[in-house]
Amino acid sequence: MKKYICPICGYVYDEEKEGVKFEDLPNDWKCPLCGAPKSLFKAEAVEVIIEEDEEELREMNYGEVSALCSSLASSCEKQYLEEEAKLFKKLADYYNSKSKLKGNFEDLINKINKDLDLNYKKAREIATEKKDRGALRVITWGEKVTMILKSLINEDIPTDKKIYVCEVCGFVYIGDEKPDICPVCKVPNFKLVEVVR
Amino acid sequence: MSELRAVRNLRICSKDCLCLFVCPTGAADTETGQIDFEKCIGCGACSKACPSGAISMVPYKYPKQQEKDNEVTERLKKIISSKVEQEQIAKYIYENGADKEKLLAKIIMKSNRLIAEDLYREAGYMLPQSNNTKKFLEDLLEKDKTNKEDIEKLLKLLDFN
């Protein structure tokens, strides 16, 4: 008898208590707390070691400039600096429109796998070593949301359900009613905003 | 000038209006619902009187950005690059893909942007008033003539520390 843990919200599926083996659950079974798909549950962490390719330091590209500007825009908003927020937002939109990158869902899956198998792992190692709790926070949230995105690419989004994105951490929830709090970053659910089809 | 100013969280404000009774300058009473920052003298009376805890006192001057270890920020920037690429690929699919792919692409685009924004906060760009932000804007100004005016305005408006 094993226990399976939801990597998103920490829910534990205990085979002994449930009386049903995890592998015998239907494939569309979802985490009863946060809706994460069965495929994300893990019995135990499996270590994968991947060699990373060396990248040289380079300047920020258009997409990165855009993301930094929109990040700063939201920080200005939080400080009630309206004019500054507007200017950063304008820069973010400008650079976003200049960024041209092509690709398909397969490319996305490859990048997601590299993030999960390598980028997040390495970052976690260093952040742990340097005792940077802030970095650990963003790594933990981002890794969970990345797992959810991976699972979305692998399955069809049901047409009769609503879709919500957490405006704080990017978590995606698919269901009828949103949870009380975001299962990843724990913000109250008014920050989970519906994505209109 | 006062070091603090009162701001109202409109999501929490229950319109009990005790702030209006205690504000010595009338700054709390406006048509937009937000405090009039020009009139606010930062005394904090409204914040203490508010029964909903909807008014907080925020500083004009922010402390220096906390030092970040270079190795940590480099690691975070690697993830940022990847997330931004994913966002941009999703944007391409959203704009050029089949109708049935658009919804998924839109979600991936939005989510990755939020992840990247959050990562930047921990990679040394938490504070708009930080030296890192200043340096970023100055570098951008050198290369970007189209948005020269806006970048210069930001450099002037932000109270860098």
Image (tube, rainbow, N blue to C red):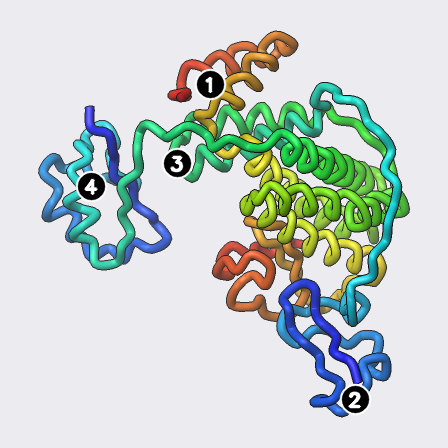
Observer-nearest of B76 and A67: B76
In the rendered view, tell whether residue B71 sits above or below residue A46: above
Tell me whether circle 2 and circle 1 mark residues in contact (CB < 8 Å): no
Asked if badge 4 and badge 2 are on a common chain, one would say no
Tell me whether circle 4 and circle 2 mark residues in contact (CB < 8 Å): no
Label number found at residue B28 = 4
Observer-nearest of A90 and A116: A116
**Looking at the image, is mark 3 or mark 2 earlier in the sequence?**
2
Three-letter amino acid code of the residue under disc 3: Gln
Three-letter amino acid code of the residue under disc 4: Ala
For marks 3 and 2, give the one nearer the viewer. 2
Q: Is residue A187 left or right of residue A197?
A: left
Badge 2 marks a residue whose secondary structure is loop
Q: CA distance from mark 4 to mark 1?
A: 27 Å
Q: Is residue A179 left or right of residue B27?
A: right
Label number found at residue A79 = 3
Asked if badge 3 and badge 1 are on a common chain, one would say no
Q: What is the crowding at mark 2: few (fewer than 14 residues within 10 Å), some, or many (at least 20)?
A: few
**Image spot of residue B92 (x, y percent):** 80, 37
Label number found at residue A20 = 2
For image coordinates 67% across by 37% down, the residue present is: B76
Label number found at residue B154 = 1
Q: CA distance from mark 3 to mark 1?
A: 15 Å
Q: Chain of mark 2?
A: A
Q: CA distance from mark 3 to mark 4?
A: 17 Å
Examine the image and state in which quarter residue A78 appears.
Answer: top left
